[in-house]
Amino acid sequence: MVLAEYATEKLKEKGISVELVDLRTLGVLLFAGSSHGEEHSEPLRILKSAIHRATHLLFAVPNYNFGPSATAKNVIELMGAEELNGKTVGFLVAAGGQRGYMGVLSLANSLMMDFRCWIVPRFVHATGADVKEGVVVSEEIRQRIEQLLTEMFHQTLP
């Protein structure tokens, strides 16, 4: 979440409208393919609405065992073409170590091939050493986040 908050702050500084959706506080999402009625899921309705309104999506995901979390994958499965088609997508990845930095490729490929999303091929992969007490302390990671945002929005950030 620290990476997402840093990115949000940088985008707001440039006057770009940002809506940060934290799945930890949204509520329980259905599992994709669940027999429960999606129409009765308020967290899902909120999430779909936010993604539908967005032109760009920045996924801030943890990397577990060389891949994004099951929750991140479930979000993609719960969305439809109406919400995802044609979006520009970037990735901020929090990981336990340096390995697995390409772990989001399966998720990126799915977004690209299934939903025709535009993937920004500059993934930010950070570890615990890059973040201390809720702050991005690594200058390299701050620069990579800003570079990702610049490429996503085609403008120079300070």
Image (cartoon, rainbow, N blue to C red):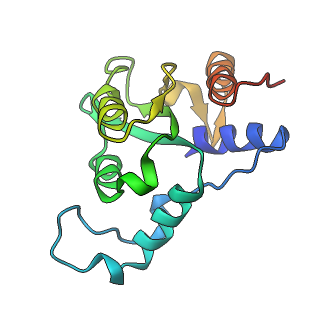
Quarter residue 85 falls in: top left
Image: 114 above or below 122: below
Instruction: Tell me what residue is drawn at x 34 percent, y 50 percent.
Output: 76
Say which quarter of the image contains residue 109.
top left
Look at 68% across and 39% down and name the residue there: 6
Measured as percent of width and height from the top left, residue 88 is found at 53, 35
Q: Whole-percent x and y of residue 32?
A: 23, 61
For image coordinates 52% across by 66% down, the residue present is: 49
Horizontal side of residue 139 vs 3, given as left or right: right
Judged from this view, the residue extending furthest toward the bottom is 40
**Quadrant, the C terminus:** top right
In percent of width and height, residue 102 lies at 34, 20
Residue 43 placement (x, y as % from top left): 43, 72
Q: Exactly how many numbered labels are in the figure?
A: 0
Q: Residue at x 53, y 25 (%)?
A: 129
Q: Is residue 26 above or below residue 135?
A: below
Q: Nearer the viewer, residue 53 or 98?
A: 53
Apparent side of residue 1 relative to residue 139 in the rendered image (left or right) = left
Q: Nearer the viewer, residue 151 or 61?
A: 151
Q: Is residue 13 above or below residue 33?
A: above
Query: From the viewer's perspective, is 48 left or right of 74?
Result: right
